[in-house]
Image: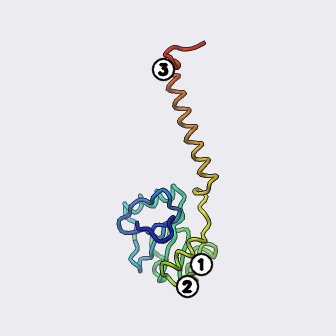
Amino acid sequence: MSRTSFPSVVTLAADHLSAPRAVRTVVVPGASAGGPAHLDESLIEVLIDIERRGLHTVLVAAAPADLTTSVAAICRYVLAADEQVLAQARAIWGSAQVRAVDSLAPADVDAVLRRLPVPASRTAARRTQAALQRVRRRARRAVRAVARRGGADGRLER
């Protein structure tokens, strides 16, 4: 994956590395622009990680054929500049999930990506909730460990 100029965005590339923690959007170039056309094992693992984390997946489609690949099917949003591609994408994904851009130049794509809503998994409330759950799990483990050893000093208190 390679970083774009927008710091919370990475582009899915041939190396299929996992997305860094601070990322909230993964851009998937269409097959006509050199992006993946088929789901292979390593790409599936990356996509599962992306989905688990609740990140946006955005297909950047330059041609109508980009919309019919197996990789395109997993994307939540579609960006396109061509009217024919936009019309076909709206028929598949719906108007709310399709965004028009002036061109597929990185600056134009980044401008649209900045306007996407923050994924629910990346909001402050959700991250706080996840942190509290981790603290609760650790506290439960610590209490169980102490209980198994018979108390803090090695004997049960009554």
Q: Which residue is mark 1?
A: 90
Question: Residue at the spot x=45%, y=58% of the render?
Answer: 20
Distance from disc 2 to disc 3, alpha carbons, whole Å, reads 66 Å
Q: Amino acid at mark 1?
A: Arg
Q: Amino acid at mark 3?
A: Arg
Mark earlier in primary sequence (3, 1): 1
Circle 3 sits on which residue?
Answer: 149
Q: What colouring style does the render use?
A: rainbow
- Check disc 1 and report its element: helix, strand or loop: helix
In the rendered image, residue 99, in percent from the top left (x then y), is placed at 59, 77
- Horizontal side of 123 relative to 108 (left or right) equals right
Q: Secondary structure at mark 3?
A: helix
Q: Are the residues at dot 3 and dot 1 in contact (C-beta closer than 8 Å)?
A: no
Amino acid at circle 2: Asp
On the image, the x and y values in percent for residue 152 come to: 52, 20
User: From the viewer's perspective, is residue 114 above or below residue 84?
Assistant: above
The 10 Å Cα crowd at callout 1, few under 14, some 14 to 19, many 20 or more, is: some
- Judging depth in this view, the residue of 31 and 158 nearest the camera is 158
Residue 124 rendering spot, x and y as whole percentages: 62, 54
In whole angstroms, how far apart are the C-alphas of marks 2 and 1? 17 Å
Q: Which residue, given by chain and number where applicable, does mark 2 sit on?
A: 102
Quadrant including the C terminus: top right
Outermost residue, left side = 15
3 vs 1, front mark: 3
